[in-house]
Amino acid sequence: MTAPELATMAEVGALAAIHAAGFPPGMAWRAGDISGLMEMGGCFVLWWPGDAFIMCRLGGDEAEVLTLATAPPARRQGLAGRLLDAAIEACRGLGAGALFLEVGAGNAAAQALYCAAGFTEVARRPRYYADGTDAIVMTLRLS
Ligand SMILES: CC(C)(COP(=O)(O)OP(=O)(O)OC[C@H]1O[C@@H](n2cnc3c(N)ncnc32)[C@H](O)[C@@H]1OP(=O)(O)O)[C@@H](O)C(=O)NCCC(=O)NCCS
């Protein structure tokens, strides 16, 4: 394993396949959702081809993790952790002072991942997700 790659529009179908495998039906993003976000300024995607990806967006002096997913057969191999580390370094290198994200209140795996990377909870959004669960807003200072 070397370093995650920067994904391009040519990989949108493969990214959607990872998302569909990683999230429950109704929560997964379609290829059009992903390409629409990738076309926005400040957005980048790092991935382990076929296995996992992270999407981030920079705006002003802040950045946001828009999504992160590892396909089930590739989990618990450190792929998401290394994607997150690479995204943190990329955002810092691009001048962001803080990185934000939202995570489901019941998503213990993702919360453990983010806590291990140094993120802390700063807010809660009640019934944020379509299934009625709360979102926890977490942040990591980069500067
Ligand atoms: C959360 C997710 C991205 C983790 O991907 P992964 O590639 O398996 O994660 P890693 O192997 O890099 O794990 C890094 C750390 O995260 C935590 N972690 C990951 N999966 C976990 C689990 N099932 N239970 C508890 N902690 C977990 C652990 O601290 C782990 O470190 P360790 O293996 O040394 O204990 C993956 O489970 C996933 O795609 N879930 C569905 C989509 C999702 O919830 N995305 C995040 C939205 S905010």
Image (spheres, grey):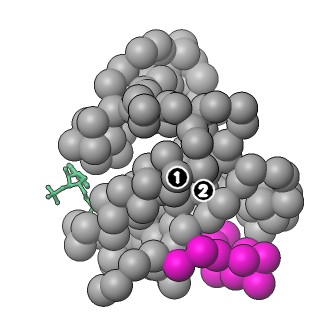
Where residue 70 sits, quadrant-wise, is bottom left
Residue 14 in the magenta stretch? The answer is yes
- Residue at 52% over, 32% down: 97
Q: Identify residue type, mark 2.
A: Met
Looking at the image, residue 2 sits to the left or right of residue 49; the answer is left
Q: For the residue marked with disc 1, what is the amino acid? A: Gly
Of 132 and 37, nearer the camera is 37
Q: Position of residue 84 (x, y in %)?
A: 40, 55
Check residue 26 for magenta coloring: no
Residue 118 lies left or right of residue 70; in this view the side is: left
Rendered-image quadrant of the C terminus: top left
Q: Earlier in the sequence, mark 2 or mark 1?
A: 2
Residue that numbered label 1 is attached to: 93
SS majority, magenta: helix
Helix, strand or loop at label 2? It is strand
Q: Which residue lies under the disc numbered 2? A: 55
Q: Which residues are magenta?
A: 5-17
State the quadrant of the N terminus: bottom left
Q: Where is residue 121 shown, x and y percent of the image?
A: 36, 20
Residue drawn where x is 54% and y is 16% of the image? 125
Residue drawn at the location 60% of the way across and 23% of the way down = 128
